[in-house]
Amino acid sequence: CFAPFLCLRPPQIRVKPDRTGVVTDGVKHSMNPFCEIAVEEAVKLKEKKLVKEVVAVSCGPQQVQETIRTALAMGADRGIHVEVSGKDYETLGPLQVSKIFAALAKKEQADLIILGKQAIDDDCNQTGQMTAALLDWPQGTFASEVTLEADKLKVVREIDGGLETIKIKLPAVVTADLRLNTPRYATLPNIMKAKKKKIVNVKPADLGVDVSSRLEVLKVDEPPQRQSGVKVETVHDLVEKLKEAGRI
């Protein structure tokens, strides 16, 4: 039996007035859609009695416990909240998160880490790969199908040319793609049960992890507002409008 880790990252929204980052105060945290798929896959493995425990992990301020509770309601057994707040949270990136996940995997003696292929806030698509590198574990990224076979994992990967099937030895890191599964909705009884499940609070320092960033954000800008379009009656009018706009 194996103990998967689920690595969850809450989304961040709205640019601060001073353009140093995004506003998270008072924002309700929700689970990254790709991480929902990762949770579902881990729970399905447990339901097939292929794993013995599912542990949901998230990094961030107190509000991320809402995200962990969602994973617990979906079927995870327990949660770990790695508390990161203030300036450290604002600069928290894939490298720092990967160091935390790698340290936790060693501490918990995990055999399988499943996380979303990318976060929908920064679209970095780096955390899974960096975690595997730090642990020196095999990785199966962009997974659309996962099959556990004894001490090996068969992963069907989505690539530019179609699908690629690989076999990797455990322990390993898997990142979930969109077509891996359809996440279940948490039922009211399971939501109530999740409130009684254990969430352990730790800090990066407890894991021996330095979360200071090597990057400096110079500024964060809102996307430019789209101008309203115009309707044209003929192809000639369209060509003239494009010329006026300097497009042709």
Image (tube, rainbow, N blue to C red):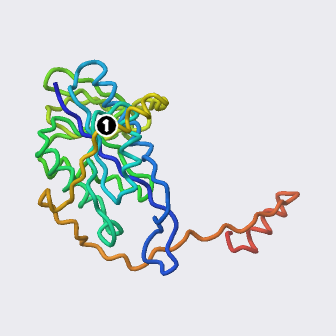
Asked which quadrant contains residue 179, the reply is top left
Give the position of the C terminus as an image quadrant: bottom right
At which x and y percent is residue 107? 11, 46
- Quarter of image, res 145: top left
Name the residue rendered at 43%, 46% in the picture. 31
- Location of the N terminus (image quadrant): top left
Q: Amino acid at mark 1?
A: Lys
Q: Nearer the viewer, residue 210 or 192?
A: 192
Which residue sits at x=21%, y=50%?
Answer: 101
Q: Which residue is mark 1?
A: 197
184 vs 77, left or right, is right
- Residue 177 in the image: above or below residue 23: above
Q: Residue at x 25, y 70 (%)?
A: 213
The residue carrying pointer 1 sits among few (fewer than 14), some (14 to 19) or many (20 or more) residues within 10 Å by Cα, namely some
Under circle 1, the secondary element is loop
State the residue in front, 37 or 53.
53
Q: Is residue 97 left or right of residue 239?
A: left
Identify the residue shown where x is 22% and y is 65%.
211
Q: What percent of the width, then of the height, locates residue 122?
A: 41, 59
